[in-house]
Amino acid sequence: MADNYLEKRYEETLGSGKIRVKKIGHTVDELLLENRSTRGYKKSYKVSVGELERIAGVCTKIPSARNQQVLRFRLVTHENGADRVLPIVKMGAALPELHLPLAGMEPEAFIVLCATVAENPMVDIDLGIAAQSMLLKAVEMGLNGLIIAAFNRAKLQEELNLPYPPLLVIAIGKGNERIELTPIAEGESHAYYRRDGTHYVPKVKLSDLII
């Protein structure tokens, strides 16, 4: 498919004895850099069910531990329950004084991830793969998102009448924040912070990651 970033992105042609590479679409590095945890969204942009289906659709192509494929998804937009999800989730635990998301910047679409079996290490592997893959797809589509693990599972299951306990929630929308990565050494604080309207995310340098 043309919109699948995992498919071949380069077209090679021969000329003047050299291989010339023509770039098509985003590189993986570009998608990864654009895929920032976003806590503020443009309220004017309404994410559709169709867009959420395209994002969730990557899960028909990604790896699955033991190929169990036990994850299931509830797609929630502003039309079918996003206002009920928002009060149940927490989107900025490291900055409690800001009460994120800020008023007027709340997400109005969510993907709720459940599993047909009890959570276990294999399910957690699938959760990580699925969540990251869906966010990369969202970025490719010009959207942004946030993986949310801080929420009341029992309350969300009841509120959405889910057949399985929710394990993760992904907020989806058109981002309205300035986010920058800042390199740190291994022993420095990993806590994200805000300064002059910019959200900074510390990332350990490659030289400290390699052992």
Image (cartoon, rainbow, N blue to C red):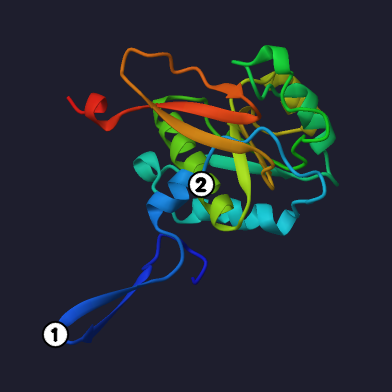
Residue at screen point 32% across, 12% down = 187
Direction from residue 6 to residue 86 in the image, left or right: right
Return the residue nearer the eye: 41 or 68. Answer: 41
46 or 198, nearer to the observer: 198
Q: Residue at x 83, y 44 (%)?
A: 78
Question: Identity of the amino acid at label 1?
Answer: Gly
Q: Is residue 80 left or right of residue 9?
A: right
Residue 50 sits in quarter: bottom right
Which numbered mark, 1 or 2, is in the foreground of this view? 1
Which residue in the structure is indicated by mark 1?
Answer: 17
* Quadrant position of residue 189: top left
Q: Which disc is residue 34 wearing?
A: 2
Q: Secondary structure at mark 2?
A: helix
Residue depicted at 77% across the width and 35% down the height? 105
Q: Could you say where residue 60 lies in the image, as x and y percent from the top left? A: 50, 55
* Label annotation for residue 141: none
